[in-house]
Image (tube, grey):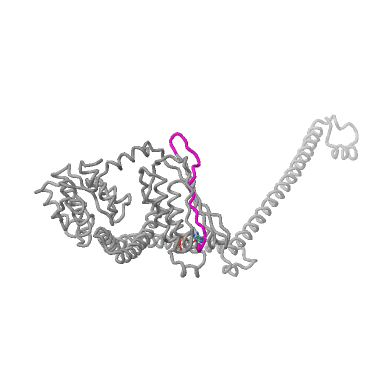
């Protein structure tokens, strides 16, 4: 056999002769040679193992270093974020301080603080909501309180007009009429704004003779326009159908406000009310409205803000012209409700143009039919109509009673709901006019009780304002319709006609 190289050398140096014949010696030499080979193999293996663990050690080392770097970078970033969040906390962490625990306790504090803030905000929101509800309630109570005597003033004024006053008295009565109506419109503005904000306005759908409607508007404003040396012109597009369906009261509110503003801010100029047909489709009539004046105009920087509530282009002007700064806000909201928008083009010193487009439903009513009705219309007469008026405020009773008696109706009065229930139980009425807020028993409860034994007598709610809430509640309790106070004599008359089988 071949011996290990080192053994081979030794054999050559030491052993002479024919040592291979000595069996014991050759066996010893074989064993030594195997030991040498085994030693070599073990050494090789040990060397290899060392190289491998050295490599692994280096890899682990660099990984660890990378992790330390990432940790350091994260801590720096965390500190930067904390400083950006709260500069007052900047000194709390010096740059050498890498203590994560410090940062975590800071974050815990922040979380606690923000939870506390959140709780405070929820409380503040609840308080604000309560305040807002209190504001709405206050407004609705106050408006009712103010409207009640105002109703009496406007109603008395209407009655005095019926009694052929002297020309000099007529003039004074007119001043009273205009002032009280202005006051009423201001109260209505404040209330409307509240209702619009809460989304409580409902739009009516009535036939409107648009031409007559805008002509009436012009007639109502002509005097005031002339007083300020203004020429109030109307440009009406004859292609517009005779009748369209929409909410005449809200349209009147929008146009009245814009025309009043145009007159208010124009002296010795021209105000043009333009009503033009934009388009007629199968179901709708689209009409463009514009109110153009040659007055003081509005500078460009003020043009957006005048649509915000309680804002006016110039505070000096306010004192000269008066106004609440609510008109345009209400117009904006009323148009939004009808999917429309108010636009303005104006230049300071040159005048303004406010314009918008409204979509009306098509109407089947024609002018000929309406004329026929008017020809057949006789002087107001409610002969043989027996009315129960349920109202607690004496002035209101007086005004409504006189109005109804002027039309020859028979009127009985109940000062509260309880008396009304008793009267309906013992008498036959053609119609019941029912105030809603009364002492002893309110109008809702009285109606509910009446409906327990009489399902047919028409009951009309008398209310200061018709909101969705009020109308919904009135119907729920069994009333047939609503009418607003102070009554417009025509509205009161037509609602009585409608429900007393005398309807035209
Ligand atoms: P009010 O007229 O009650 O102050 P509005 O909301 O109707 O409230 O109008 C807000 C402001 O917009 C007015 O105070 C006025 O400064 C300006 N403004 C409105 N209409 C005109 C107009 N036709 N010409 C000039 N300024 C106007």
Q: Is residue 421 found left or right of 228 in the rendered image?
A: left
Q: Nearer the viewer, residue 217 or 358?
A: 217
Residue 321 % position (x, y)? 46, 67
Q: Residue at x 25, y 49 (%)?
A: 493
Magenta segment's dominant SS is strand
Q: Residue at x 58, y 67 (%)?
A: 87
* Magenta segment includes 276: yes
The quadrant of the rendering that contains the C terminus is: top left
Residue 174 % position (x, y)? 33, 63
Q: Is residue 256 found left or right of 38 in the rendered image?
A: left
Q: Residue at x 85, y 30 (%)?
A: 20
Residue 396 % position (x, y)? 23, 59
Q: Nearer the viewer, residue 332 or 196?
A: 332
Q: How many marks?
A: 0
Give the magenta-colored segment's residue range.
266-284
> Is 217 drawn above or below residue 35 in the view shown?
below
Q: Residue furthest left?
A: 426
Residue 225 % position (x, y)? 45, 60
* Magenta segment includes 217: no
The quadrant of the rendering that contains the N terminus is: top right
Identify the image quadrant of residue 175: bottom left
Identify the image quadrant of residue 369: top left
Q: Nearer the viewer, residue 387 or 89?
A: 387
């Amino acid at each position: 056999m071949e011996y290990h190289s080192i053994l081979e050398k030794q054999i050559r140096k030491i052993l002479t002769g024919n040592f291979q014949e000595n069996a014991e010696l050759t066996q010893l030499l074989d064993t030594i040679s195997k030991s040498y080979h085994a030693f070599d193999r073990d050494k090789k293996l040990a060397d290899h193992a060392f190289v491998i663990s050295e490599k692994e050690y280096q890899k682990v080392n660099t990984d660890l270093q990378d992790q330390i770097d990432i940790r350091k970078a994260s801590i720096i970033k965390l500190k930067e974020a904390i400083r950006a969040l709260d500069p007052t906390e900047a000194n709390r962490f010096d740059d050498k301080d890498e203590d994560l625990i410090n940062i975590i306790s800071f974050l815990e504090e922040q979380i606690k603080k923000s939870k506390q803030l959140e709780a405070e905000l929820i409380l503040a929101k609840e308080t604000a909501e309560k305040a807002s509800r209190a504001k709405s309630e206050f407004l609705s109570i106050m408006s009712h309180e103010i409207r009640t005597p105002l109703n009496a003033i406007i109603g008395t004024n209407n009655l005095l007009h019926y009694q052929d006053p002297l020309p000099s008295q007529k003039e004074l009565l007119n001043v009273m009429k205009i002032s009280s109506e202005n006051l009423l419109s201001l109260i209505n503005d404040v209330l409307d704004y509240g209702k619009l904000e809460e989304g409580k306005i409902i739009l009516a759908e009535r036939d409107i003779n648009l031409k007559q409607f805008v002509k009436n508007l012009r007639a109502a404003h002509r005097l005031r326009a002339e007083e300020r040396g203004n020429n109030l012109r109307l440009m009406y597009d004859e292609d517009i159908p005779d009748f369209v369906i929409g909410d005449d009261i809200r349209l009147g509110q929008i146009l009245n406000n814009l025309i009043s503003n145009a007159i208010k801010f124009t002296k010795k100029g021209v105000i043009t009310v333009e009503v033009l047909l934009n388009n007629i489709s199968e179901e709708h009539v689209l009409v463009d409205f514009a109110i153009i004046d040659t007055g003081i105009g509005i500078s460009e920087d003020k043009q957006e803000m005048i649509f915000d509530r309680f804002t006016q282009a110039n505070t000096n002007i306010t004192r000269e012209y008066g106004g609440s700064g609510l008109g345009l806000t209400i117009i904006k909201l009323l148009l939004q409700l009808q999917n429309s928008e108010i636009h303005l083009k104006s230049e300071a010193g040159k005048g303004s143009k406010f314009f918008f487009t409204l979509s009306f439903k098509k109407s089947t009513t024609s002018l000929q039919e309406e004329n026929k009705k008017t020809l057949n219309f006789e002087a107001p007469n409610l002969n043989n109509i027996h009315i129960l008026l349920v109202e607690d405020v004496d002035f209101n009773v007086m005004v409504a009673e006189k109005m109804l008696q002027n039309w020859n109706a028979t009127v009985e009065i109940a000062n509260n709901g309880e008396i009304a229930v008793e009267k309906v139980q013992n008498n036959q009425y053609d119609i019941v006019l029912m105030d809603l807020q009364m002492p002893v028993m309110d109008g809702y409860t009285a109606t509910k009780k009446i409906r327990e034994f009489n399902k047919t007598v028409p009951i009309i709610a008398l209310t200061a304002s018709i909101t969705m809430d009020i109308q919904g509640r009135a119907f729920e309790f069994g009333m047939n319709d609503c009418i607003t106070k102070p009554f417009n004599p025509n509205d009161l008359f037509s609602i009585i006609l409608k429900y007393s089988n005398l309807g035209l």
